Image (cartoon, rainbow, N blue to C red):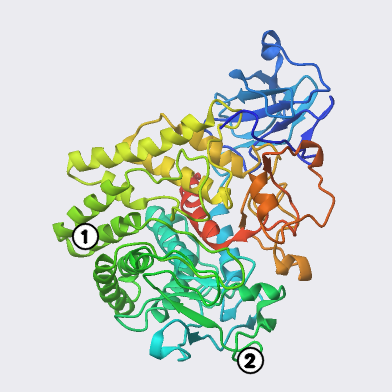
Amino acid sequence: MKKTLISLAISGLFAVSMMGQSVIRVNQMGYLEDDVKVAVMLVDKADNAISAKNFKKIRIVNAATKKSYAVDKVTETPAWEPMAQSLRIDFSSITEPGEYYIDAFGTKSGTIKIDNNAYKGAQEIPLYYMRQQRCGYNPSLQDSCHQYDGRLVLSGADDGKHVDVRGGWHDASDYLQYLTTSANAVYQMLFAYTQSPQVWGDEFDAAGHKGANGVPDILDEARWGLEWMVKMNPSDTLFLNQIADDRDHRFAGLPGDDPVDYGWGEGKDRPVYPCCGKPYGLSKYLNDSKGLASSVGKFCSSFGLGAEVFQSIDATFAQDLKRRSANAYDVAKANPGACQTASCISPYYYEEDNYVDDMELAAMQMYKATGDTRYLLEAVDYGRQEPVTPWMGADSAHHYQWYPFVNIGHAMLALDKNKKVGNEFARNMRSGLQRVADRANGNAFMHGIPFIWCSNNLTVAFVTQAILYREITGDQTYREIETAMRDWLFGVNPWGKCMIVGLPAHGDFPRDPHSALTNLHQIQVTGGIVDGPVYCNIFKSLKGVHLRNEDKYAAYQNSIVVYHDDYADYSTNEPTMDGTASMTFFLGYLASKSNPK
């Protein structure tokens, strides 16, 4: 991105400055011992610029012994407006476990933890938010909600018919529920488990209450979603896509108190929308659906991986999922095109515009389940239609236009025993990473991800793809940008902000997220990743977005990109369920690097 595109913010808790507003941003979770380790220093205009000949005076200090060491390299990058200078400070050669800080001419960083155990236990934190988002019975609130769900709409002769679709998760701080994001959440958690099964603990039962039940908590949570997806697939010919719509936004309280009347009484039945292959909606706002494959393909892949994982836990459940997966694949294949979500009183919906990535992943799950090479060939064909996930390298996109944000089907094909196929899809993965790296354009944070709504979800997707590519190929080319984007989520960003509520516990994470639980009841939404910074034109254009408190970053915001730790800014500070679930892979991966007990 262009070097002038971002504004800067201060973080008084985590950077002690003796000169103007200069700050040093570090990963507040910590660094693994063999990590690429980089901090970013932002030098304020009020301070004297640091010349290259003085870079060698920047030191990293062991907080316990006070012994100081020269850093490995200091690189000056284009200044991030409105700061005068930006420096990338590399200290990768420091591998001794301990706590350190950087001292640069009187500006000191916060604590830098170097330890292979830095992420131990972090993988479980997103599951706290997932349990808080449960619909039906909510263990965090010990209350039930939306017990009348729901009644079919836009279903012809079946309009008004009751279907039992209780369960699942609320999508974000509202109480809508979408198959699109929920199925992706299920797949991401199942995938995270399969990649690092040894790291997942068992401290909660299936209902989400404290107490082990012999099943890893991540699988309890995935099963909660799978059981809801089964309800959303009441017959072989009916696949449901959404519960409730944006009329829900009239209420901002606890889910059990939801009084919204959709036409069947206050707090009673909510509308249930089917997957539909053409534009639809109940009011003047219609989506642009063109087929079923994006949604029904997600049914297939999540059911398929669920069958694989639960075979050794509950064979009967697994067998049902396997049958449903095969049926969903056939339906999706016969109905190509993207199926979008519905709005009613506002023009905002998930504008998913692609489907071949969903079909690629679905075909690979079918291939794994059956061994039938027909599915492998179909996966290759779908994958070749979209070799790079389109947001990678783009400047902008519509809301959820290309979703999921990471194509795990590519990673599965990159592992294929046919070297020609494997190499082709490894190159596709590399091409996406390179496009983002090119767009970063040498900026201090190596950030080349577009600042669209939910930019943090794209960042998680990038980290996921970078890890998978590196592990599959052994290619270290993108190790630094992979680490930079991970570090971005934990404070190495212009605002010095950790983007996950409560992680780390001592970190500068969002204290005023867009959540009724926090806003009205002071309940911390632990584990939820917030949307992240957006282009200022997005912030200004969304209905209802404003600031209710003084902007503590006001001196550093510019006209292009903003982030606010403010309840009223749902564009940057609202936690999302699917983004949170998507973190389980990379946090599980990092936790797997912990030292054995």
Mark 1: give few (<14), some (14-19) or many (20+) Cα within 10 Å.
Answer: some
Report the front residue among 153 and 177: 153
Above or below, comparing residue 266 to residue 80 in the picture? below
Mark 1 = which residue? 367
Is any atom of residue 491 visible in this view?
yes
Q: Residue at x 80, y 42 (%)?
A: 554
Residue 415: x and y, percent?
A: 26, 45
- Asked if residue 121 lies left or right of residue 504, the reply is left
Above or below, comparing residue 71 to residue 295 in the picture? above
Mark 2 element type: loop
Mark 1 element type: helix
Q: Earlier in the sequence, mark 2 or mark 1?
A: 2
On the rendered image, what quadrant is the N terminus found in?
top right
Report the front residue among 566 and 12: 566
**Tag count:** 2
Q: In which image quadrant can residue 570 be found?
A: bottom right
Label 2 or label 1, whichever lies nearer to me, is 2
Above or below, comparing residue 300 to residue 77 in the picture? below
Q: Residue at x 55, y 29 (%)?
A: 95
- Asked if residue 428 lies left or right of residue 170, the reply is left
Residue 52: x and y, percent?
A: 67, 11
Mark 2 residue type:
Gly
Most extreme residue toward the top, as rendered? Answer: 53
Residue 395: x and y, percent?
A: 52, 40
Report the front residue among 172 and 92: 172
Q: Residue at x 77, y 40 (%)?
A: 11
Mark 1 residue type:
Tyr
Residue 74: x and y, percent?
A: 62, 18
Question: Disc 2 and disc 1: Cα gap in Å?
Answer: 47 Å
Mark 2 = which residue? 265
